[in-house]
Image (cartoon, helix red, strand yellow):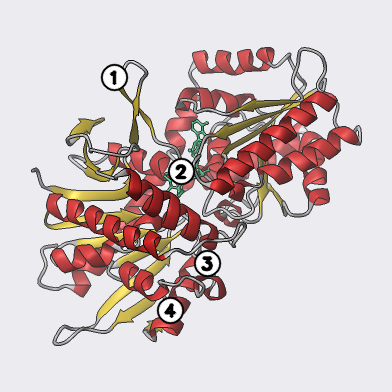
Amino acid sequence: MSQHDLVIVANRLPVDSRTLPDGATEWVTSPGGLVTAMESVMKGVDSGAWVGWAGSPGEAPDPFEADGMHLYPVRLEAEDVEKYYEGFSNGTLWPLYHDVIVDPEFHRTWWDSYVAVNRRFAKAAAEVASPGGTIWVHDYQLQLVPEMIRSERPDVRIGFFNHIPFPPLELFSQLPKRNQVLRGLLGADLVGFQRESDALNFTAAARKLLGYQVDQHTVTVPGIGASEPRQVLAKCFPISIDAGAITALTEDPELRERAAQLRRDLGDPKRIVLGVDRLDYTKGIRHRLKAWGELLNDDLIDPSETVLVQVATPSRERVDAYRQLRDEVELTVGRINGDFAPIGRPAISYLHRSFDRRDMTALYMAADVALVTSLRDGMNLVAKEYVASRPDLRGVLVLSEFTGAADELRAAILVNPHDIDDLKSSVLRALTMSEEEQEEAMRSLRRQVLDHDVQTWAKLFLEDLEEIGRTAKPGRPA
Ligand code: ADP
Ligand code: F6P
């Protein structure tokens, strides 16, 4: 097996394998912001490796290469998918880390599976990292991996980045295995978060639950036996997108035509309002639809002039809360279309499938307003992608205060999605903003997104990791 200086470990590989009806396998881009971000970072790295799951239960494919990356698939059996992925990751941690929007479930068998699968990922990563190399572990599914790698490979630098929020102590304390999770994370040299408040929540948990000493962003982990205490840096690194690549796409005449065609396909409405989300209860899709239905009902929006395009990417479809959400969203969309759509045109154009990057960019280019209404969201890359797609300085971003992106994109129309009246008036304000106002806001948003792209984010994280690794372990190769 080859050895790599930089190894990414994430629950998913950047591509998912799908079995076609004729039994052949096709590879498609995996869903979610983690893959969007890390894929573009890894394309600039020579001989980087990515350890992750290929998206289907059962035997893992052999290691293979894609886009210059070395991919190492990790096996998940059907029972692991049920207990580690759908269970502890997405039935316990996901809701707990997102302000308990739905009730988290706690089951000891889910935890056992989480431990076992984290061990499998740690072993796979430890096998392919070169001596003194760097292993960068990602997201809530793999919080035990840093400590597990450290016990096998004390020579490597270990970074961890949490793509989702880290909850306040009052919520985190509910987690039955909270101390094990904290110790797992503290196996890293550097633990990165989206927002400063996430980093503070984490250091507060280390201090209050483990009794560890915390000095600003540094947690001191006591040594075991004769070993020295270690210092772990916990800091925020707001993630971003490949803004330059998206802006470059918008200059492609074929994409401009595709955006114009989209508008024609929708019946040439005066205004297109766009929502793009995984079909997840954290995204506030129900709140958005409620506001939209009321605006139509109150005659504040004319459906023959304004259409809502809602892309709802299939996600975690076997988890109960996601099934229920899909049923509710589709019922509501059907009702709104039944009540308000003009003949032959939708009031809401609902798309429950994946699109490629070009189609997604054409959608952003066509949209007069982008609507992000998350009830809680680590960052929300859709907001940044919309901004990157608008070098024409047109378009308005309505952005939930409860996203990480709201800390940076202050020139958006910021909204509390729980307040349906606020949501309605924000949509109306967006629809009536003058071209000058749009330009002024978009210019400021673009400055932020273009100056802080995903390459800069990765560089800052890896530089800090290298620095802390050097000071924490003097004998190790730099
Ligand atoms: P999350 O990571 O929770 O899914 P983000 O907004 O941070 O949320 O990231 C979502 C990513 O997935 C974005 O890069 C977006 O463009 C992409 N995406 C969302 N829906 C689709 C879809 N239907 N087809 C293709 N890509 C999608
Ligand atoms: O950070 C958000 C995230 O959970 C990523 O970890 C993941 O890649 C993405 O959303 C999509 O979720 P899933 O991998 O469960 O389909």
- Name the mark nearer the viewer: 4 or 2: 2
Drawn side of residue 273 relative to residue 360, left or right: right
Q: Residue at x 74, y 39 (%)?
A: 289
Q: Residue at x 61, y 46 (%)?
A: 283
Drawn side of residue 330 relative to residue 152, left or right: right
Question: Which numbered disc flags the more N-terminal residue, 4 or 2?
Answer: 2
Q: Which mark is residue 24?
A: 1
Quadrant in which the N terminus appears: top left
Q: Residue at x 27, y 69 (%)?
A: 187
Mark 2 burial class by Cα count in 10 Å: few <14, some 14-19, many 20+: some
Q: Secondary structure at mark 1?
A: loop
459 vs 212, nearest the viewer: 212
Q: From what the image shows, is residue 275 above or below residue 376?
A: above
20 vs 398, nearest the viewer: 20
- Name the mark nearer the viewer: 3 or 4: 3
Q: Which mark is residue 167?
A: 3
Reading the image, the residue beneath label 4 is 216
In 3D space, how far apart are the residues under numbered discs 4 and 2 (Cα atoms)? 29 Å
Q: Secondary structure at mark 2?
A: helix
Reading the image, the residue beneath label 2 is 33
Toward which corner of the image does residue 84 lie, by quadrant?
bottom left
Amino acid at pointer 1: Ala
Amino acid at pointer 3: Pro
Q: Is mark 2 within 8 Å of ligand 1?
A: yes
In 3D space, how far apart are the residues under numbered discs 3 and 4 (Cα atoms)? 18 Å
